[in-house]
């Protein structure tokens, strides 16, 4: 690591805001030397709770994050926020608008808001996000919130860098629940039915609950206990726990705080499982935010108590390693591609019918494959690298 | 990638040379400061910057100078564009510059002011460290070109 980066790291650890901002820029830009910088950060991380928040555009994510940050600050905790917005696939430009909604804590430097754009690199954003989280963690933030639009795989990968994932579902989105089902809904540890003062909130809670019950039946192999539950009246089911809030529709779901971790004690034989809870909020006036925070905390303690945290962290690092390797290889391949005449010419050759993408891929890759084979014979050291990948 | 017209192709290749040189996006904060509710210009410039391939953070209306400073520092922007139509530039801009100084961000942030600034006030703002002042009638292309040429190397 060069002297400038060393200085930057020291300044970051000393709590200089500018240094944290600059470090995140280096991470985002892949500035030469950023790798060593991030490597150094790791030794100082592990103290922050990382929360991911996702949902469709207009669901109220930024407003809720704002209230969340405000409440954490009232409790004396420092907050880092990474707000990710889409960028144009054509120009790479972006308008990052989340900051406007985060007005409650404006002027308070202990809330560090950073807007990032999805710059469209393959898997790169989740790595950049994870690294930015590391920087905020090392800086000393107690809570780190990642906010992103839930639109596809990229976003799913991003929020998976969080310990706890909250998915916002606006009321009356019966149909959007359907479209969200694959992917987004599966990653939720907490569902937030925001704008709970609007018509259709009850119905949305109901639909979510039904979906969770169906899911339960599958994951437990449809055992008698859970099979019965799917039929049972909601009030009797402890794990979903939205009893109180649902009736009045006012977003007051105190019952949740107790109900959350109970999924752990359900089946003594099988490993403990977290059943996602459902919270109703009205982010614009802060209703339900305390309950939401309790749920997030309940999930955090579930992770610790059940021992699943270690496993989760392991999985996450495995994914980070894979992504990093993929990116590195991708960079190598880009160089290789340039040497093979550039992708434009190759694409033109496919267009004119001279060849096809598969043939090109094989040809471009063959020197790499040859190198790998050679390396495998000469140096078994490569073996250990792929081992690390698996652990 | 959409390359349906010559114009698109042009801006594409322009963008590519740009990223090749810098290997990163230019980050801009478009800021409305003080009691000034006119944000059409800020919106237009935000949109134009986006289309030019910049990453734009818009502050929203009625921000205090220290709030602008906070955003500029945390977002680590290359360019801070302040839009002022209220006539209070002579008090608000120096406050922002002082705030940037406090966080060590004054040196390498390109500060632009857009709006109605009387000629006699310009030297003072330039002394404060404002790199350029764009009055009514400035073309958007001119502004974008200025940013591309003057965004600080870091």
Image (spheres, grey):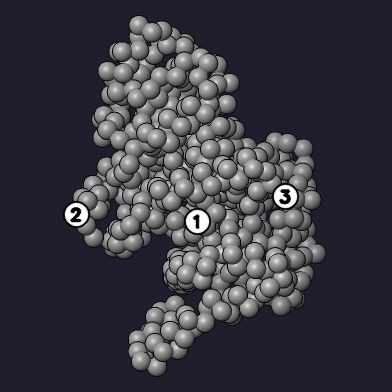
Chain letter for the residue marked with disc 3 in the picture: A
Query: What is the number of callouts on the image?
Result: 3
Mark 2 is surrounded, within 10 Å at the Cα level, by few (under 14), some (14 to 19) or many (20 or more) other residues, namely few
Q: Nearer the viewer, mark 3 or mark 1?
A: 1
Give the secondary structure at mark 1. helix
Q: Is label 2 in contact with label 3 (beta carbons under 8 Å)? A: no
Q: Where does residue A27 sit, x and y in percent of width and height?
A: 38, 53
Q: Which residue is mark 3?
A: A205
Query: Relative to B154, does residue A328 appear above or below in the rendering?
Result: below
Identity of the residue drawn at 69% across and 46% down: B4
Q: Is residue A360 left or right of residue A310?
A: right
Q: Nearer the viewer, residue A52 or A150?
A: A150
Q: CA distance from mark 2 to mark 3?
A: 55 Å
Q: Chain of mark 1?
A: A
Q: Quadrant of the N terminus of chain A?
A: bottom left
Q: Tell if the residue under mark 3 belongs to the same chain as the one under mark 1.
A: yes
- Which one is in front, A280 or A115? A115
Residue wearing tag 1? A125
Give the class, few, some or many, for how many residues have Cα within 10 Å of label 3's Cα (few <14, many ≥20).
many
Residue A3 circle label: 2
Q: Element type at marker 3?
A: helix
């Amino acid at each position: 690591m060069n002297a400038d980066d060393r200085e930057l790291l020291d300044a970051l650890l000393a709590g200089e805001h500018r240094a944290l901002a600059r470090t995140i820029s280096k991470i985002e830009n892949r500035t030469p030397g950023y790798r060593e910088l991030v490597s150094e950060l790791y030794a100082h991380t592990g103290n922050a709770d990382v929360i991911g928040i996702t949902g469709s555009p207009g669901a109220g994510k930024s407003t809720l994050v704002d209230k969340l940050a405000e409440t954490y600050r009232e409790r004396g905790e420092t907050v880092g926020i990474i707000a990710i917005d889409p960028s144009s696939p054509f120009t790479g430009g972006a308008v990052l608008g989340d900051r406007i909604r985060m007005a409650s804590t404006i002027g308070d430097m202990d809330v560090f808001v950073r807007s990032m754009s999805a710059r469209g690199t393959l898997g790169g954003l989740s790595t950049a996000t994870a690294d930015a989280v590391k920087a905020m963690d090392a800086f000393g933030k107690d809570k780190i919130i990642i906010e992103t639009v839930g639109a596809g795989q990229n976003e799913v990968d991003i929020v998976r860098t969080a310990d706890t994932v909250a998915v916002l579902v606006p009321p009356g989105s019966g149909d959007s629940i359907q479209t969200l089902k694959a992917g987004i809904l599966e990653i939720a540890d907490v569902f937030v039915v925001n704008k709970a003062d609007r018509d259709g909130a009850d119905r949305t809670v109901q639909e979510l609950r039904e979906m969770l019950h169906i899911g339960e039946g599958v994951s437990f192999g449809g055992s008698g206990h859970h099979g019965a539950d799917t039929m049972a009246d909601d009030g009797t089911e402890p794990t979903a726990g939205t009893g109180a809030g649902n009736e009045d529709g006012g977003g007051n779901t105190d019952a949740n705080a107790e109900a959350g971790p109970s999924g752990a004690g359900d089946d003594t034989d099988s490993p403990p499982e977290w059943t996602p809870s459902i919270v109703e909020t009205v982010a614009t006036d802060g209703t339900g935010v305390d309950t939401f925070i309790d749920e997030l905390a309940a999930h955090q303690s579930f992770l610790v108590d059940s021992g699943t945290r270690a496993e989760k962290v392991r999985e996450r690092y495995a994914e980070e390693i894979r992504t990093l390797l993929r990116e590195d290889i991708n960079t190598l391949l880009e160089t290789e591609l340039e040497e093979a005449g550039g992708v434009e010419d190759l694409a033109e050759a496919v267009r004119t019918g001279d060849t096809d993408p598969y043939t090109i891929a094989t040809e471009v890759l063959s020197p790499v494959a040859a190198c790998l084979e050679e390396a495998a014979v000469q140096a078994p050291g490569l073996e250990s690298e792929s081992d690390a990948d698996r652990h | 990638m959409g390359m349906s017209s010559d114009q698109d192709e042009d801006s594409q290749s322009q963008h590519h040379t740009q990223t090749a040189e810098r290997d990163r996006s230019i980050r801009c904060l478009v800021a409305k400061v003080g009691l000034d509710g006119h944000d059409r210009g800020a919106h237009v410039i935000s949109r134009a910057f986006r289309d030019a391939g910049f990453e734009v953070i818009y502050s929203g209306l009625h921000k205090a100078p220290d709030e602008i400073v906070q955003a500029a520092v945390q977002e680590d922007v290359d360019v801070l564009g302040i839009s002022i139509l209220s006539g209070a530039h002579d008090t608000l801009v120096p406050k922002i510059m002082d705030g940037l100084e406090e966080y060590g961000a004054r040196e390498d942030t390109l500060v632009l002011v857009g709006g109605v600034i009387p000629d006699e006030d310009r030297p003072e703002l330039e002394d404060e460290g404002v790199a350029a002042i764009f009055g009514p009638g400035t073309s958007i292309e001119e502004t974008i070109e200025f940013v591309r040429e003057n965004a600080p190397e870091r």
